[in-house]
Image: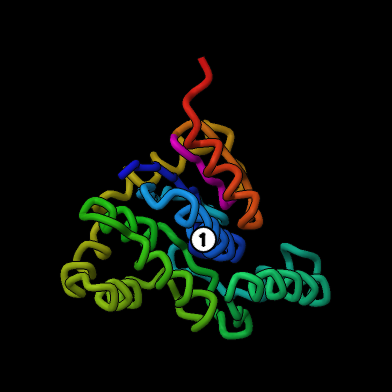
Amino acid sequence: MTELAIDIVSDVVCPWCFIGKHRLEAALQLLREERPDIAPRIRWLPYFLNPDTPESGEPYRPFLERKFGGPEKLAQLWAQIAAAGRTAGIEFAFERIEVRANTLRAHRLIHRAQMAGDAGALVERLFAAQFLQGENVGDAAVLARLAGECGDDEAAALAYLRSEADADAVRAQAERGQRMGISGVPFFIFDGRYGLGGAQPPEVLLDALRRSLLPPTP
């Protein structure tokens, strides 16, 4: 098998990141039909979409109405994202979300999962909790339960989240991304060589995957 490293800079409260994840999965499925020998190795890197979010969070809709210019513009934005989501098999339920969550704990939980193996199932569950069920993905107890649903030890996850373990490491990763010039998410890095920003269509992502498999130019 040929390993292909894919880094995804993302935040679990970014709806386009959820769409981007599903579009990448579609692109990888197309790639497997051409190259069944390819073994993707996906690593999730942190990004703080709203770095000023209070630790305990704050009301979701009022914040977005202020950010995007009122309820009508927010409704238009949600409709646009919802339409894009349906093409990726996602039925967004923005009306269920009550809390604008601080995502440091969620990123730490992903970091912890990746130290033990693949975090893909956890990341999917976090996105679903945020955008389908409207759960507070900044709450330690909620996150520990979601980790347990993905096969982790819920009590151990809760103890970890209630500590400050790996908080500095996660912040440092996010700062590294900023120094690289990443100012929006999702952002994909293929084979450590090719960067691509945005929730691009599967065909665009497939082209980037193909290019990343070519030998480096001398």
The verdict on residue 190 being magenta is: yes
The verdict on residue 126 being magenta is: no
Mark 1 Cα within 10 Å, few/some/many (few <14, many 20+)?
many
Q: Which residues are magenta?
A: 185-191
Under circle 1, the secondary element is helix
Above or below, comparing residue 129 to residue 14 in the picture: below
Q: Position of residue 135 (x, y in %)?
A: 46, 80
Which corner quadrant of the image does residue 23 belong to? bottom right
Residue found at x 65% / y 49%: 204
Closer to us: 169 or 7: 7
Asked if residue 174 lies left or right of residue 200, the reply is: left
Asked if residue 132 lies left or right of residue 123, the reply is: right
**What colouring style does the render use?**
rainbow
Residue found at x 77% / y 77%: 75
Q: Position of residue 122 (x, y in %)?
A: 35, 67
Across the whole image, how many numbered discs are drawn on residues?
A: 1
Q: Position of residue 1 (x, y in %)?
A: 30, 45
Residue found at x 65% / y 76%: 86
Residue furthest right as drawn: 72
Which corner quadrant of the image does residue 68 belong to? bottom right
Above or below, comparing residue 123 to residue 50 in the picture: below
Label 1 belongs to which residue? 21
Asked if residue 99 lies left or right of residue 55, the reply is: right
As shown in the figure, which amino acid type bears the numbered disc 1?
Lys
Closer to us: 91 or 168: 91
Closer to us: 19 or 177: 19
